[in-house]
Amino acid sequence: MAKCDRCGREMGHAGGICQFCLSRSQIPRCPQCGEVAKGKLDTICARCGASLHPERGVVTTRRRRYARKITDNPIPTVLLAVLLVVVVVVFLGQIIRTDDTTPEMSAFTQALRETSQAPPTPYGPQLNRSGDAAVQVAESLTDRGLSVRIRVGATDHAISSITEVTDAWVMVETTSRRWVAGDPLIGAVISPQEKPYYYRGWDFATTAQFNDFMSRFSLYKQKKATYDAANATYQRQMSSGADQSILDTQMALLQVANAEEQAALDQLHQLVRDQSSLIII
């Protein structure tokens, strides 16, 4: 015969708990589904997961009971939330951080402002004027112990050759190991988001190297202008039907001008290869 699952008495029916055990008050039933407890008194219902003793304040479902274990001690959760907030703040701070309050940036801004307020040079191309101002700022900041470079390039469009340079400006290294651009003619620090072309070009580590570049760049421009003028004269003489002797003389002048221009260009390229670093973003 079948025996009672609770007390082991023989029963007239198969399986389950005998009537004697069912009549005992200490054997609880599940308050939700009516399932009879088969284990200890303070257990969870095997059928639905409800507590057999809800009057003791025990959570009435398995899911809620698991959640209760986490929220009973909120300190780890709070610490985790605080840690996440700190990480986010630090991460965002590195992204949007500016160095405007550092001594380097303060000195940089002041030097740019003072140079831009000086009487402007009334003559010369843009590169000469910006180059002179860049040298003033670079020398002032170098005397203060800052890491400075003079960069040449174009501030409003992309260029691929050193012969296309139109502007010069200053780059300063900040405490966060970043190089920040400043325009000495405008008198302001330039961000890469505002004007990205300030963050590409050719860098010179010293004012002496930059002055050497300016000298060779000016020589190249002069030789190129001489060649262009000689070529224009030759083309005009050919169009007007000049004598061959005149054309031959002009061709000889054109070849000399071309050779001098090429020599000046080679010297410029050699200087750039030896003393500058190309920065492209």
Image (spheres, rainbow, N blue to C red):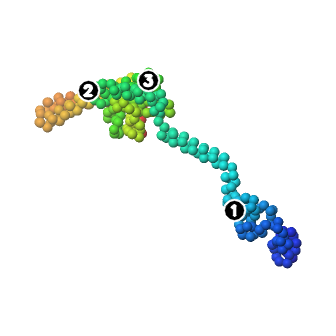
Q: Amino acid at mark 1?
A: Thr
Res 61 label: 1
Q: How many marks?
A: 3
Residue position for label 3: 142
- Label 1 secondary element: loop
Label annotation for residue 125: none
Q: Quadrant of residue 19?
A: bottom right
Label 1: how many Cα within 10 Å (few below 14, some 14–19, many 20+): some
Residue 90, above or below 253: below
Question: Residue at 77% of width from left, 68% of height from top?
Answer: 29
Q: Nearer the viewer, residue 127 or 16?
A: 16
Q: Residue at x 37, y 24 (%)?
A: 136
x and y percent of residue 32 in the render? 71, 68
Asked whether, in this view, residue 72 is left or right of residue 175, the answer is right
Q: Callout 2: 10 Å neighbours few (<14), some, many (20+)?
A: few
Distance from Cα at disc 1 to Cα at disc 2: 87 Å
Helix, strand or loop at label 3? It is: helix
Residue 278, visible in the rendered structure? no
Residue bearing the label numbered 2: 123
